[in-house]
Image (cartoon, rainbow, N blue to C red):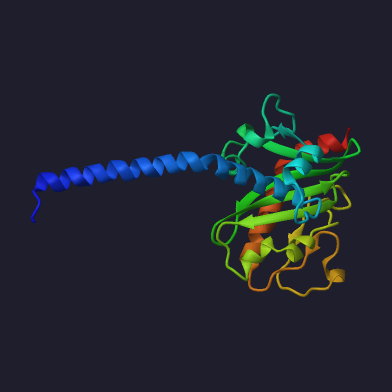
């Protein structure tokens, strides 16, 4: 039976309203679970720079017990009244005015003392954005650990920045040279370089992923430079 045009239009509008309502409802129902998952992933990444998480660990409890946080401005001053959890690093990365940027600092504490300072980092890889965290030991000179992630680096090549074996290469490297100048840690070109050829400020590269490595190098240096006023303030205490 052939339907009139008005019937077809009314049916289409009704279906649009019904399906749209169902999708909006599902979004509202799933939103708390999504936010909880994002929070857990962030906590895992921050803790992952300083400890090895095991299956069954209560990440939220570990984070709450061991991590303190604060937010600082571009001069390294603590910004009162702003929670680190409310600062979106990606948004701050895109803020062009340096004086308006906010920088979260996470402190891993043991027995009431700061064992490591964990700093969010953000940048660009070969194909898309990359991000992560770098943990500095209490001296704020020595790398305790790093965690990297990415949006679209090449599987098996640049995407290897998420692998523990790659990230472990940064442990115990130094970010200041013997004169106290910030040099960061650089991933070199080529893979299989002996540790004796890398020294204190370089890590072995990833075969076929030089451009991603360049992005990681730039991300680390740029963010350590942005955090430099805060680092110096803490070192001079």
| Residue 128 in the image, given as x and y percentages of width and height | 54, 57
Which residue: 56% across, 45% down? 34
Q: How many marks?
A: 0
| Residue 106 in the image, given as x and y percentages of width and height | 75, 40
Left or right, residue 198 beside residue 81: right
Front position in the image: 183 or 31: 31
215 is higher (above) or lower (below) than 204: above
Front position in the image: 119 or 8: 8
Left or right, residue 61 beside residue 235: left
The C terminus sits in image quarter: top right
When asked about the image quadrant of residue 227, the answer is: top right
Front position in the image: 139 or 183: 139
| Residue 217 in the image, given as x and y percentages of width and height | 69, 57
161 is higher (above) or lower (below) than 145: below
View extreme (top): residue: 81
| Residue 58 in the image, given as x and y percentages of width and height | 75, 46
When asked about the image quadrant of residue 21, the answer is: top left
The N terminus sits in image quarter: bottom left
Which residue: 64% across, 52% down? 131
18 is higher (above) or lower (below) than 216: above
View extreme (bottom): residue: 192
Left or right, residue 168 beside residue 20: right
View extreme (right): residue: 111
Q: Is residue 133 visible to the viewer in this orientation of the structure?
A: yes
Q: Is residue 181 visible to the viewer in this orientation of the structure?
A: no
Which residue: 15% across, 48% down? 8
């Amino acid at each position: 039976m052939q339907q009139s045009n008005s019937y077809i239009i009314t049916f289409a509008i009704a279906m649009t309203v019904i399906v749209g309502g169902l999708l909006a409802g599902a979004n509202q129902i799933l939103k708390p679970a999504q936010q909880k998952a994002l929070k857990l992933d962030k906590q895992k990444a921050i803790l992952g720079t300083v400890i090895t998480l095991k299956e069954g660990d209560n990440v939220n409890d570990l984070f709450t017990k061991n991590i303190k946080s604060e937010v600082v401005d571009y001069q390294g001053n603590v910004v009162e009244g702003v929670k680190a959890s409310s600062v979106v690093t990606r948004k701050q990365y895109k803020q062009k005015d340096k004086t308006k940027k906010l920088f979260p600092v996470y402190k891993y504490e043991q027995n009431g003392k700061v064992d490591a300072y964990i700093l969010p980092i953000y940048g660009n890889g070969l194909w898309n954005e990359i991000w992560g965290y770098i943990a500095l030991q209490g001296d704020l000179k020595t790398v305790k650990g790093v965690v990297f992630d990415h949006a679209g680096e090449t599987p098996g090549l640049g995407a290897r920045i998420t692998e523990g074996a790659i990230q472990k290469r940064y442990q115990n490297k130094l970010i200041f040279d013997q004169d106290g100048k910030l040099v960061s840690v650089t991933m070199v070109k080529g893979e299989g370089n002996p540790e004796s050829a890398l020294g204190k400020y370089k890590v072995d590269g990833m075969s076929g992923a030089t451009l991603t490595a360049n992005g990681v190098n730039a991300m680390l240096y740029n963010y350590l430079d942005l955090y430099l006023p805060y680092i110096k303030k803490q070192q001079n205490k």
